Structures are given as structure tokens and as C-alpha cells.
Image (cartoon, rainbow, N blue to C red):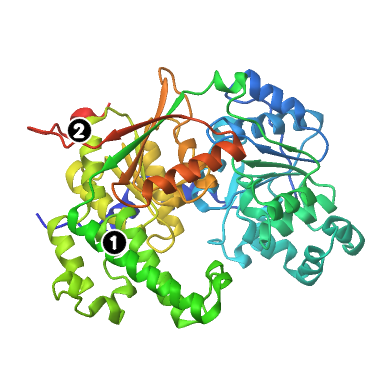
């Protein structure tokens, strides 16, 4: 059997019944609409939990942001809010999403859970001329990415918006300088709104909506309250910022027990030796940067000096080879550096590149081996494996595809590896039939994966936002689910566990996000291994 290649997977994905092309044909308007319509949300196909009802009752006035931990039904609250508002009078709804996968998800939510038959998703894939011809903005419930909305409604106000963002009171500035209300909707739902703050199209939309009296309900698990600058930007848009802690008694009762198991994995000796050699090289570069540009320069993300660029390349190489495995750094530009090709006395006359080749020969990817073994021994219905590296996700995903089959595995990586349409197709496949999702950070925000019950972190999340978003993928509580279990893999003798614990402490201190922690040592399965298929529910 020929080895499965990445393009083979993408081809199968595009031909599958759950491909985005197939789904989008039903989610995009096909007939022109000449006049604006509105909608009423008459009922929802779900009931709110008591703490969700309490949050809903707090929503008043024109603006609010919910810092509700991922997985606890922010979208359900938004749906109930729209039902409440449309009881007073019919409404026109703009549902902002940061990505195509989320757009598909929220359009299906509006249709299936809110009963809005004519909810439509509008993306940049529909050309501006076609959007105008079809009158897509006349529909009463539109799901869309901020860039498309900005291009059609706010582009002509570019200069005014830029000046507003520089002012102390951008909303007040816009009230005095906009002669018309350019956003023709009554309510904006801003999903994952932390993506819309700052110098973004979404921020311009929210400022304009606020200035024009459009009601805003913004949803966010991680509104980045640990950033003083971001908090100030949020306050410019929102009257109220409500952060709901996962440790509130009413919330705690509705989520499964959160367990993080830190799994210490033996680092292959050759990889550990390579890691330590690179540590010395990075330290050497840091000293050179300090000598040339001063201590403060190390804190800058400098891209002007060759010395700084080489230092960053070596730092990334060193980090990724232990966090995502040796095979994840194949083809990195850093291998071209002369220091890595020069024979070294401490390596017996071999170069760092020679040592890397030997590392690949002895153990191509120690993290992948650990994941495969872990999936063999844990019983699950749906599992997610998170990592930063696109290359590593592709490699591991293809191994699992060869082992389990196309119908059991979905791979979801960022723009560098998949188009937005392919990403959405991968998500739809995991929601419908696949049991394992191998994903990069593109899957961390907002995905509705209600039955995921087991998660593996190939590498430590780099900040609290990633920590909570990753954990949130398995916090939803289907019947019988008592524990949300995460395994975090860390390589012995490296920086990984310290990094993991640093972000853990920050997540707890800033967001109050806590979990039970245990530490285990990785043990290989002895004797005949059970197949993955046997363990899948």
C-alpha cells in the first residue's frame, strides 16, 4: 500500500459528503432579496441551566461581554437573548464570527436550535458583486466574518475610523462624525470577540455599532483581561464586563470534573543532547545581542538585525524539536546556519546537523509515539490532540489515518496547511463521524464539539487564552460524563514542564480557571497492543 500523503487527505476531504462545498450550497442565499426582512426567534430547542438564566437576566442596555469559560453554553445564552428581544418586536441580527468553520457552525445553530429557517452565512468566497446582486444583507439573520461586513459597509469610512481609534473617546468621536448609521442591523452577536479588539475590522464594526445605537452581545471565554491595554479597549466598547468564574457553585455543578495529568516522557538521549547543544548556541547569540545592542533589546521582537533573526530561529528550533518532536523541524531554515554545519569537538567532530540526522534515525518523533500509545490505552468516544506545529499535526494525523482509516480521523490545521474551506470540512467531518481530531490552534476557539471527552496536549499552551480554549473543548457535559480529562505531554530534562506550570498559574490567577493536577511517568505498553478501533465507543 502506497504511503498516504497530505494531498491525498485533502482530496478525500473535498470529495466527502461533509465537505464545506456541499454544506455551503445550503447556507448561502441563492435568490435575490430586494427589501430588508426581519426575524422572530419564537422558541429554542434547548433549555437554559439555572446559571445561564441568571446571566441572561443580567443582559440589559446596549452592550455586554460575557467572560464565560469555554464549553458552558455562551451561544445558548445568545440564542435565548435573541428570543427575548424578538418577543418585543421583530429583529435584524448580524452574527459575527472570526472564521469560516465557526460561521458554518453558528448558521447551523440558528437554523437547527433557534428555528430561523432563513439564517445565512456570508463569507468572502461570495464576490462583492454577487453579494450586491443577491441583496444578501437584506436577510434578517446573517452570519459573517468581520472583514466582509467591513468591506461592504465601513470601507468608505476608513479615515474617520482610524481617527476615532486614536482618540480618547472613539465612540463619542464617531457619534459626532458619522452622518448615517452604516450597519443595517438591530443586534450584533460578536462571537469570540477577543479577536475583534484593537487594530482590526471587528473593532471598527463594534465601535460603529455602539455609536449608532446597535445592541451588542459579545461572547468571549478569554477576553484577555490580563492585558491592561486590551482591558482599556474593551471598556471603550462595553458598559459592562461580566466575568463568570468556573468555580462559582452554580457553574461548577454543571461541568464535569477537570483533570490535568502531566505526563513526563523520557526524552531520547540523542535529542536531549541536541537540545543542550542548541541551548549553548542560543545563549551565545543572546550574549552577542546584548554586547551589540544592550540588554533591553532582548525584549524586542527585532527583525532588523541578522544577529537577532538568527537567535530567534535557533530559539524556535530548540523549542519546537522537544515540544512537537524532532520530525516537526524538518526543513527549518535554521539548519542552514554555518554554526549548525560546522564540526564540533564536543560532538566528536560531528556537526549539529549530523546529530539531528542521528536523532531522526533513533526516534523520529517521541511525542507522536507517546500519543499513539496513549490513545491505545484510554477509552474514549471522541478525542482531540492539540499542538502548535502544522508540520507535526500533519505527520501525526497521517499516521493515524493509515492506522484507523479515513472515516475515523480528522486533521485540522491553520492557513499554512489548509484553506479555510478545507478547515471547515475537517471540522464537519469530526462533528459527524470521526473519532479523533488532530489539530493546531485553529481548533482552540469556539468550536462546538459536544461529545469530545478526552484530550492530549502534545505541547504546553503558550498563554492563558490557549490554556482555557483548549480545555474548553471538553468541558461540555453529555449524559454520563463525569470527568474532562487532559493529558499534557512534557519531555524530561527540558523547559516544558516549567512552561506548562507557569501558564497554569497565570490561568488560575487571572481567570480563576482551576483543575485537579497529577503527575505521571510515561510507561510504554508491554506485550501485544490493543487496537484503537477496539477502544472507540
Q: Which residue is mark 1?
A: 276
Q: Residue at x 24, y 60 (%)?
A: 327
How many numbered discs? 2
Q: Which residue is mark 2?
A: 533
Q: Nearer the viewer, residue 408 or 382?
A: 382
Q: Is residue 257 left or right of residue 354?
A: right
Quarter that holds the N terminus: bottom left
Observer-nearest of 226 and 385 = 226
Q: Residues within 10 Å of mark 2 (few under 14, many from 20)?
A: few
Q: Which sits in the foreground, 318 or 192?
A: 318
Secondary element under disc 2, as helix, strand or loop, is helix
Can you name the residue that lies furthest to the right here? 176
Q: Position of residue 300 (x, y in %)?
A: 56, 69
* Residue 211 % position (x, y): 84, 53
Q: Where 324 falls versus 431 (above or below)? A: below
Tell me if residue 32 can be seen.
Answer: no
Q: Relative to 179, is 77 above or below?
A: above
Residue 354 versus residue 106 in the image, above or below: below
**Quadrant of residue 134 within the rendered picture:** bottom right
Residue placed at 73% from the left, 59% from the top?
A: 204
| Relative to 126, 178 lies left or right | right
Is any part of residue 480 visible from this angle?
yes
Q: Secondary structure at mark 1?
A: helix
Residue 479 position, x and y percent, is 43, 18
Q: Position of residue 429 (x, y in %)?
A: 36, 43
Q: Residue at x 27, y 40 (%)?
A: 408
Q: As drawn, which residue projects farthest toward the left?
A: 527
Amino acid at each position: 500500500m502506497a504511503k498516504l500523503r497530505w494531498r491525498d487527505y485533502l482530496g478525500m476531504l473535498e470529495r466527502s459528503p461533509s465537505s464545506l462545498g456541499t454544506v455551503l450550497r445550503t447556507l448561502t442565499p441563492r435568490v435575490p432579496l430586494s427589501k430588508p426582512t426581519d426575524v422572530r426567534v419564537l422558541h429554542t430547542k434547548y433549555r437554559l441551566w439555572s446559571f445561564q438564566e441568571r446571566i441572561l437576566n443580567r443582559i440589559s442596555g446596549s452592550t455586554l461581554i460575557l467572560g464565560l469559560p469555554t464549553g458552558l453554553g455562551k451561544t445558548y445564552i445568545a440564542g435565548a437573548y435573541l428570543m427575548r428581544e424578538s418577543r418585543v418586536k421583530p429583529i435584524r441580527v448580524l452574527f459575527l464570527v472570526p472564521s469560516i468553520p465557526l460561521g458554518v457552525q453558528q448558521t447551523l445553530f440558528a437554523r437547527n436550535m433557534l428555528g430561523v429557517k432563513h439564517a445565512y452565512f456570508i463569507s468572502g468566497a461570495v464576490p462583492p458583486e454577487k453579494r450586491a446582486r443577491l441583496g444578501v444583507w437584506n436577510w434578517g439573520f446573517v452570519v459573517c466574518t468581520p472583514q466582509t461586513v467591513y468591506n461592504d459597509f465601513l470601507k468608505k469610512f476608513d479615515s474617520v475610523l482610524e481617527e476615532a481609534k486614536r482618540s480618547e473617546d472613539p465612540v463619542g468621536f464617531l457619534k459626532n462624525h458619522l452622518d448615517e448609521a452604516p450597519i443595517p442591523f438591530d443586534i450584533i452577536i460578536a462571537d469570540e470577540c477577543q479577536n475583534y479588539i484593537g487594530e482590526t475590522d471587528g473593532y471598527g464594526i463594534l465601535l460603529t455599532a455602539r455609536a449608532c445605537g446597535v445592541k451588542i452581545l459579545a461572547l468571549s471565554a478569554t477576553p484577555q483581561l490580563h492585558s491592561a491595554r486590551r482591558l482599556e479597549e474593551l471598556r471603550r466598547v462595553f458598559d459592562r464586563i461580566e466575568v463568570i468564574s468556573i468555580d462559582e457553585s452554580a457553574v461548577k455543578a454543571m461541568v464535569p470534573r477537570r483533570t490535568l495529568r502531566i505526563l513526563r516522557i523520557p526524552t531520547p538521549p540523542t535529542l536531549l543532547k541536541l537540545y543542550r547543544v542548541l541551548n549553548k548556541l542560543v545563549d551565545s547569540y543572546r550574549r552577542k545581542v546584548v554586547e551589540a545592542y544592550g540588554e533591553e533589546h532582548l525584549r524586542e521582537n527585532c527583525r532588523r538585525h541578522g544577529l537577532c533573526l538568527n537567535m530567534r530561529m535557533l530559539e524556535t528550533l530548540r523549542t519546537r524539536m522537544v515540544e512537537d518532536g524532532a520530525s516537526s523541524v524538518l526543513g527549518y531554515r535554521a539548519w542552514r546556519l554555518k554554526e549548525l554545519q560546522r564540526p564540533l569537538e564536543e560532538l566528536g567532530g560531528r556537526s549539529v546537523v549530523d546529530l539531528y540526522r542521528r536523532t531522526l534515525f533513533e526516534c523520529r518523533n517521541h511525542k507522536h509515539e507517546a500519543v499513539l500509545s496513549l490513545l491505545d490505552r484510554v477509552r474514549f468516544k471522541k478525542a482531540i490532540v492539540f499542538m502548535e506545529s502544522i508540520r507535526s499535526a500533519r505527520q501525526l494525523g497521517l499516521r493515524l489515518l493509515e492506522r484507523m482509516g479515513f472515516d475515523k480521523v480528522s486533521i485540522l490545521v491553520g492557513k499554512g496547511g489548509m484553506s479555510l474551506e478545507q478547515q471547515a470540512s475537517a471540522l464537519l467531518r469530526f462533528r459527524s463521524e470521526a473519532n479523533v481530531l488532530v489539530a493546531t490552534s485553529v481548533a482552540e476557539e469556539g468550536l462546538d464539539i459536544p461529545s469530545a471527552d478526552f484530550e492530549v496536549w502534545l505541547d504546553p499552551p503558550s498563554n492563558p487564552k490557549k490554556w482555557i480554549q483548549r480545555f474548553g473543548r471538553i468541558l461540555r457535559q453529555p449524559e454520563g460524563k463525569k470527568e474532562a480529562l487532559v493529558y499534557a505531554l512534557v519531555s524530561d530534562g527540558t523547559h516544558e514542564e516549567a512552561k506548562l506550570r507557569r501558564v497554569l498559574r497565570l490561568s488560575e490567577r487571572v481567570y480563576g480557571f482551576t483543575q485537579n493536577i497529577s503527575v505521571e511517568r510515561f510507561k510504554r505498553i508491554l506485550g501485544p497492543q490493543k487496537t484503537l478501533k477496539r477502544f472507540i465507543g
